[in-house]
Image: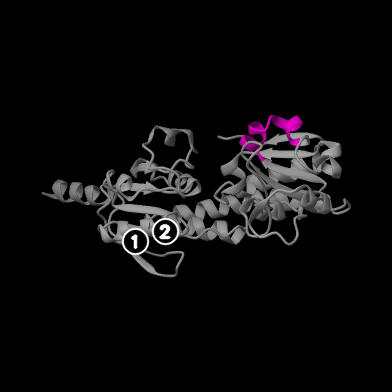
Amino acid sequence: MKQIVIGLGLCLLGCGLAQPFTVKDARGQTITVRSIERIVSLNGVTTEILFALGVGDRVVGRDTSSYYPASVNKLPTVGYQFQLNTEGILSLRPTLVLGREDVRPPTVFDQLAAAGVTVVRVPDKPSLEGAKEKIRTIAAAVGRVERGEELVRRLERDLLVLRSKQRQATTRKQLKGIFLYLRGTNVTYVCGQGSNPVGMMELAGIANAAKGIQNCQQMTAEAVIAAQPDVFVVFTAGLESIGGLEGLRKLPGVMQTPAGQNGRVVAIDDLYLGGFGPRAGRAALDLFVGAYERSGLYIAGAQE
């Protein structure tokens, strides 16, 4: 009988049926999570955090921005986080769905909740404190609070290395940078305040040269030239989509800037640079190294 009771207790923990967890979501609402048996993640960094917390085996579906760690690519997808379909998500029979509160269409979360699925809206602030809040929110939702604090401490240790490098570089001029979102020559944007990559630039000690721009706006030669950046920061896939450094030099206004003339570009993986997740400290360090300690084109960041 004792063995049966112990086995039942292990099943309750292992099957996601343990005592409910409570979490405060991005809207400040207290959510009760009753089962983490079948999780669907609607955001790349959310998926990354779930795996880092040790509950990756509970994730049964993902959105297409979820590609790290590599093992998630075996999971079925439910579309892109800003082009979702409620029926597709429900077909995976989730007990818990997590994603940014700005998913689109915005009715998706309401429809999931009406179908009886527990939904947690994850905060997404482009800052160090935002990264910690994101980790802690997801950790609370899946009952892994202690593991979440371990991830926060690891993030802080990475930042100590960055701060040390920044102190050693105090005699250098602070560089100005522009983040360009590129997806082929027809999709070119300059991103400013409020965007995650610019938040990462500022964490790395690179001043945002795109003053007056909120989020992302269509790239124009006038805006690029007026900014006079010392360095361009781009997603690696975006740079590849326009033909690399030579393609970047052909974009309007680029060669009329110090960054363009010197070919000074830092390219980093989308999720690594823009996610503000557990690897944010490492990503900021890579960005600092690429901007301040290298010249020309620097492709930063290991994926594993």
Mark-to-mark CA distance, 2 and 1: 8 Å
Q: Which span is picked out in magenta?
A: 235-248
Residue sitting at the far left: 1
Nearest to the observer: residue 161 or residue 223 = 223
**Residue 145 visible in the displayed image:** no
The residue indicated by pointer 1 is: 110
Q: Is residue 271 magenta?
A: no
Q: Residue at x 75, y 51 (%)?
A: 164
**Tag 2 near tag 1, CB within 8 Å:** yes
Q: Amino acid under label 1?
A: Asp
Q: Amino acid under label 2?
A: Pro
Q: How many marks?
A: 2
* Residue 106, disc: 2
**Residue 54 visible in the displayed image:** yes
Give the percent coordinates (x, y) of residue 213. Answer: 70, 59
Give SS at disc 2.
Answer: loop
Give the percent coordinates (x, y) of residue 57. Answer: 35, 40
Nearest to the observer: residue 281 or residue 73 = 73
Q: Residue at x 89, y 53 (%)?
A: 171
Give the percent coordinates (x, y) of residue 68. Answer: 50, 38
Q: Residues within 10 Å of mark 1 (few under 14, many from 20)?
A: few
